[in-house]
C-alpha cells in the first residue's frame, strides 16, 4: 500500500504525454517486488494490529494466547470482553431477549442512548419470531413493540414495513426482503451491539485491520488510473497478480 | 466506564429468563406494577420475587419511551423509587431499582419529574454514602469462616488469619463486626494454646494487630494478662518474623489513648523536676493510682512508672502526699504484682521514695512491715534480675538508716531459719568461671548476670556492690560468718572499717554513690 503511494508520487512528478491509455506507466513484477522489499515495517506494529483485531472482535481465548505467545499487551481488559461476547453470542444465536437483558445488566444506559440499536434488536426479535413460524406472536409483537418505535422515530418506518412484509408472504425465504432472514442479518445486528458496547467502554468500535484494507483498496484504485502494476485482488491471499498489458 | 450492575447482582441474575413458551412480551405492565406495589422487602423467595419484578420493569422500559409513559400512567414510579429506600432491601433489589429509576428519568421529562418527586435524589445519595448491608453481612460470614479455618491443620489454617487481616484492613466497620464474632478472643486463645514457633502464630499476631488498629474495645481485649505476656515473649523471640508481628501488635495496642496518655505523663514527670507540684495537684496522682489497679498489665506498668518518675527527688511533703493517695496496701500488692516488670517499677518507685528522705523508711517498715515483707517475698522468689536489683537498692538505702532499719533489713537478708539463707546476697564478685553451687534463686540470678556480658557487667557490679554494702553496713557476727564458711561460699574480702562517717550521719546516699566510692577505694 505504501509502495503504491510512492509510485503515485513518482508518477505525479513525471511529465507524461496526454493520452489516457499511453500515460499509464508500466511496473514489472521484479521492480515492484524490489521496491516492496525496501519498505520497512515493524513486527510490533503488526502484533498490535492482530491483538486489536482479536480484542475488538471478541476472541478472548485467542487474544489471551496471543498475549502469552507474542508478549503483546491487549488494549483493553480481557475480562470485559467476556461480557460483551456473551451478548454477541446471544444475538448470533437469535436469542434477542436474552441479549437485551445482558446488555442492560452490563450497562443500562446503552440502549437508552442508542435508539437505532434498540430498534434493530427489536426488529431482529420480530425476524426470529417469523423465522420460528410464530405468526400470531409476531403480529402481536409487531403491534406492541415495533409500531411504537415507528411512532417515536419516523426513520424506522421503512425498516418496519420491510420486516412486517415478511408476514405477508407464504414463502418467506424467497420473498423480497428475504435477506432479513439470513444469518448475515443476525451478524449485522451482533456487530452493531458489539460496537455500541465497545463505545460505552470508551474503546474504538472498529478494529484497525479493516481500515487498512480499505486504504489499500482506495490506493490501488487511485493507482489504477495512472499505472499498470502487480495488483492485489484477492484479500484473503494477498497474492500479487501480474499486470495485464 | 460502564456502570456494571454485574458485580453484586450477578448471582441473583441467574434466574430463568422467560422461555419461548411464555409470552414474548413478558409480564404485563399492570401486573408488574401491582406486584411491586404490594411487596415489601423480605427474605428468600419474597425478595427474589421483588427483584424479578424490578428487573423486568427495568428491561421493559430501557430504550422504550412508550413503555416508560405507560408505567408512569400506571403509577409505578413511586413504588420503584421506594424500593431504593426499603430497609433490608437486598443488593440486587437496590441495583435493579436504581437502574429502573435512572431509565425512567432518561429522555422523558415527565419521567424525570416523577422520579424526583418520589424522592429518588435523597435515596440515591444515601446509597452512595452507605456501605452495602448485604456486602457487610457477607463479610461478617466470611470472618466467621476464616476463624473456623484457622483451626484447620496445615497451610489453610496458617494462611486463614492473613486472609482475615486483608479483609478487615483499614475498615472500622469490619473491625466492629469482628468484635461481634469474638475474633480477638478466638485468635488469642489459639495463640495461647499453641507454640509461638509457627507460621500460624505470625499470621495470628498480624491479624490481632489489625483487629486492634482502630477499636479501643478490641485493644482492651488484647491487653489481658496472658496475651500481653505472650506478646512480650514474642518480642524477645529468636525468630524475626515473630518479633516483627509482635511489634505490630504492640504498636496498635499503644494506640490506646490511656496508654498514650500515660506515656506522656511519664515523660513529663521525668523532665519536670521543678514543676512537679503543679503536676501533683492537678489530680494526676489519683488517676495514676487508679490506673495502677487496672486489669491491664500495660496500664499498671505505665502508671507505676509515671509515679516512679514523679517520686524522684520530690520533697518529703510531696512524697507523703503521694503515699497517702497510693496507700501501703496498694504498694505492697504492686510489689507482688503478677508481672515482673510491674514489680520492678514498683520497687524503683519505693527506691525513689526512700531516697533522700530519712523518715520515709517508716513507710517501708511501718504497718507491721507490710512493704518490707513484700520486698522480702519478692527477693526470695523473684527470678527477674531487674526486680532483685531494685529490691537491693531499696534495702541498701534503708540499711543506711538507723538501727531499727538495719535490723529490719537484716531480717530480710538473714531470716532466723538457716535454711532460708539467701546466698544471692553473697557473691563471688567479679570472678569469671563457673559459679559455685548456690541455692536456687541466687543461681538463676547470677547466671543471668554473667560477667562476660558487658552490659550485664554494670548491673552485676551495682548489685554486687549493693550486697556488699549491706554486708558492710550491718555488723555481722562471727556466727553468721561461720555459716557462710560452712556452706562453702566465698566472700568478698573487704575490710569492715569502723566509723564510716556517712552512715552515722544517716546520710541517705544512693547505693550508686557508695558503689562509686567503693570502686575508688579499691583502686587506691
Image (cartoon, rainbow, N blue to C red):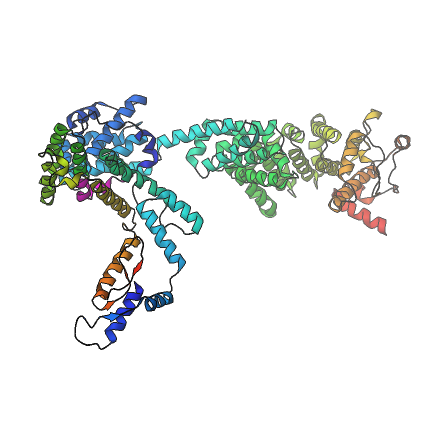
Which residues are drawn in magenta? A106-120
Q: Is the magenta stretch mostly helix, strand or loop?
A: helix
- List x then y, in percent, for residue B319: 63, 38
Residue A97 placement: quadrant: top left
Please report the residue visible at 77 percent of the width from the left and 34 percent of the height from the top. Answer: B444
Please report the residue visible at 60 percent of the width from the left and 47 percent of the height from the top. Answer: B271
Please report the residue visible at 55 percent of the width from the left and 37 percent of the height from the top. Answer: B249
Is residue A108 within the magenta segment?
yes
The one of A136 and B447 positioned closer to us in this rendering: A136
- List x then y, in percent, for residue B283: 53, 37
Residue A22 placement: quadrant: bottom left
Determine whether, in the image, residue A52 is placed left or right of residue B476: left
Q: In this view, does B414 lie above or below A162?
A: above
Q: Which quadrant holds the C terminus of chain A?
A: bottom left
Residue B122 visible in the shown view = no
The mark tally for this picture is 0
Determine whether, in the image, residue B408 is placed left or right of residue A206: right
The one of B335 and B497 positioned closer to us in this rendering: B335
Is residue A243 within the magenta segment?
no
Amino acid at each position: 500500500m505504501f509502495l503504491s503511494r510512492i509510485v503515485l508520487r513518482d508518477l505525479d512528478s513525471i511529465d507524461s504525454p496526454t493520452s489516457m491509455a499511453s500515460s499509464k506507466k508500466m511496473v514489472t513484477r521484479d521492480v515492484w517486488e524490489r521496491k516492496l522489499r525496501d519498505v520497512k515495517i515493524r513486527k510490533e506494529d503488526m502484533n498490535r494490529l492482530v491483538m486489536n483485531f482479536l480484542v475488538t472482535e471478541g476472541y478472548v481465548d485467542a487474544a489471551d494466547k496471543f498475549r502469552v505467545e507474542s508478549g503483546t499487551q491487549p488494549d483493553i481488559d480481557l475480562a470485559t470482553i467476556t461480557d460483551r461476547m456473551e451478548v454477541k453470542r446471544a444475538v448470533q444465536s437469535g436469542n434477542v431477549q436474552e441479549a437485551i437483558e445482558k446488555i442492560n445488566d452490563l450497562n443500562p444506559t446503552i440502549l437508552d442512548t442508542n435508539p437505532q440499536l434498540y430498534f434493530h434488536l427489536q426488529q431482529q426479535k420480530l425476524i426470529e419470531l417469523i423465522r420460528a413460524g410464530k405468526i400470531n406472536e409476531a403480529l402481536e409483537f409487531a403491534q406492541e413493540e415495533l409500531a411504537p418505535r415507528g411512532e417515536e422515530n419516523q426513520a424506522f418506518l421503512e425498516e418496519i414495513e420491510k420486516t412486517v412484509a415478511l408476514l405477508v408472504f407464504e414463502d418467506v425465504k424467497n420473498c423480497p426482503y428475504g435477506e432479513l432472514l439470513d444469518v448475515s442479518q443476525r451478524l449485522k445486528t451482533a456487530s452493531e451491539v458489539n460496537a455500541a458496547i465497545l463505545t460505552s467502554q470508551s474503546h474504538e468500535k472498529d478494529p484497525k485491520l479493516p481500515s487498512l484494507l480499505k486504504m489499500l483498496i482506495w490506493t490501488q484504485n487511485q493507482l489504477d488510473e495512472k499505472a499498470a502494476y502487480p495488483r492485489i485482488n484477492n484479500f484473503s491471499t494477498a497474492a500479487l497478480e501480474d499486470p495485464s498489458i | 466506564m460502564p456502570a456494571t450492575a454485574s458485580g453484586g447482582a450477578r448471582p441473583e441474575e441467574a434466574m430463568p429468563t422467560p422461555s419461548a413458551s411464555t409470552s414474548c412480551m413478558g409480564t404485563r405492565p399492570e401486573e408488574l406494577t401491582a406486584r411491586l406495589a404490594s411487596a415489601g422487602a423480605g427474605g428468600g423467595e419474597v425478595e427474589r420475587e421483588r427483584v424479578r419484578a424490578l428487573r423486568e420493569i427495568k428491561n421493559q422500559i430501557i430504550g422504550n419511551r412508550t413503555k416508560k409513559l405507560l408505567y408512569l400512567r400506571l403509577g409505578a414510579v413511586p413504588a420503584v423509587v421506594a424500593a431504593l429506600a426499603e430497609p433490608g432491601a437486598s443488593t440486587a433489589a437496590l441495583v435493579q431499582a436504581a437502574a429502573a429509576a435512572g431509565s425512567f428519568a432518561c429522555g422523558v421529562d415527565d419521567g424525570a419529574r416523577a422520579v424526583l418527586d418520589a424522592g429518588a435524589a435523597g435515596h440515591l445519595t444515601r446509597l452512595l454514602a452507605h456501605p452495602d448491608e448485604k456486602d457487610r453481612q457477607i463479610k461478617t460470614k466470611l470472618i466467621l469462616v476464616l476463624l473456623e479455618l484457622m483451626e484447620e491443620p496445615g497451610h489453610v489454617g496458617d494462611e486463614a488469619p492473613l486472609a482475615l487481616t486483608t479483609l478487615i484492613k483499614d475498615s472500622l466497620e469490619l473491625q466492629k463486626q469482628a468484635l461481634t464474632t469474638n475474633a480477638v478472643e478466638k485468635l488469642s486463645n489459639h495463640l495461647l494454646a499453641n507454640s509461638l514457633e509457627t507460621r500460624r502464630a505470625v499470621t495470628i499476631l498480624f491479624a490481632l494487630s489489625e483487629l486492634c488498629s482502630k477499636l479501643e474495645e478490641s485493644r482492651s481485649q488484647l491487653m489481658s494478662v496472658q496475651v500481653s505476656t505472650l506478646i512480650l515473649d514474642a518480642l524477645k523471640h529468636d525468630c524475626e518474623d515473630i518479633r516483627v508481628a509482635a511489634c505490630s501488635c504492640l504498636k496498635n495496642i499503644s494506640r490506646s489513648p490511656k496508654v498514650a496518655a500515660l506515656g506522656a505523663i511519664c515523660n513529663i514527670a521525668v523532665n519536670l523536676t521543678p514543676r512537679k507540684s503543679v503536676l501533683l495537684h492537678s489530680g494526676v496522682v489519683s488517676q495514676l493510682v487508679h490506673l495502677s489497679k487496672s486489669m491491664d498489665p500495660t496500664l499498671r506498668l505505665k502508671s507505676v512508672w509515671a509515679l516512679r518518675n514523679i517520686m524522684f527527688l520530690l520533697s518529703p511533703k510531696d512524697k507523703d502526699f503521694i503515699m497517702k493517695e497510693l496507700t501501703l496496701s496498694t504498694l505492697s500488692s504492686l510489689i507482688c504484682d503478677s508481672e515482673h516488670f510491674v514489680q520492678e517499677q514498683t520497687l524503683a518507685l519505693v527506691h525513689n521514695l526512700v531516697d533522700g528522705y530519712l523518715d520515709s523508711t517508716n513507710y517501708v517498715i511501718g504497718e507491721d512491715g507490710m512493704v518490707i515483707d513484700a520486698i522480702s517475698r519478692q527477693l526470695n522468689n523473684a527470678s527477674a534480675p531487674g526486680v532483685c536489683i531494685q529490691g537491693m537498692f531499696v534495702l541498701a538505702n534503708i540499711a543506711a538508716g538507723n538501727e531499727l532499719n538495719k535490723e529490719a533489713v537484716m531480717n530480710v537478708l538473714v531470716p532466723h531459719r538457716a535454711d532460708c539463707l539467701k546466698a544471692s546476697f553473697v557473691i563471688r564478685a567479679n570472678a569469671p568461671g563457673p559459679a559455685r553451687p548456690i541455692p536456687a534463686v541466687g543461681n538463676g540470678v547470677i547466671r543471668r548476670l554473667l560477667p562476660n556480658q558487658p552490659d550485664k557487667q554494670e548491673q552485676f557490679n551495682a548489685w554486687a556492690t549493693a550486697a556488699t554494702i549491706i554486708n558492710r553496713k550491718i555488723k555481722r557476727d562471727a556466727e553468721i560468718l561461720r555459716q557462710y564458711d560452712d556452706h562453702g561460699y566465698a566472700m568478698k574480702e573487704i575490710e569492715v572499717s569502723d566509723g564510716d562517717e556517712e552512715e552515722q550521719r544517716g546520710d541517705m546516699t544512693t547505693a550508686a554513690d557508695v558503689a562509686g566510692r567503693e570502686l575508688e577505694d579499691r583502686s587506691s
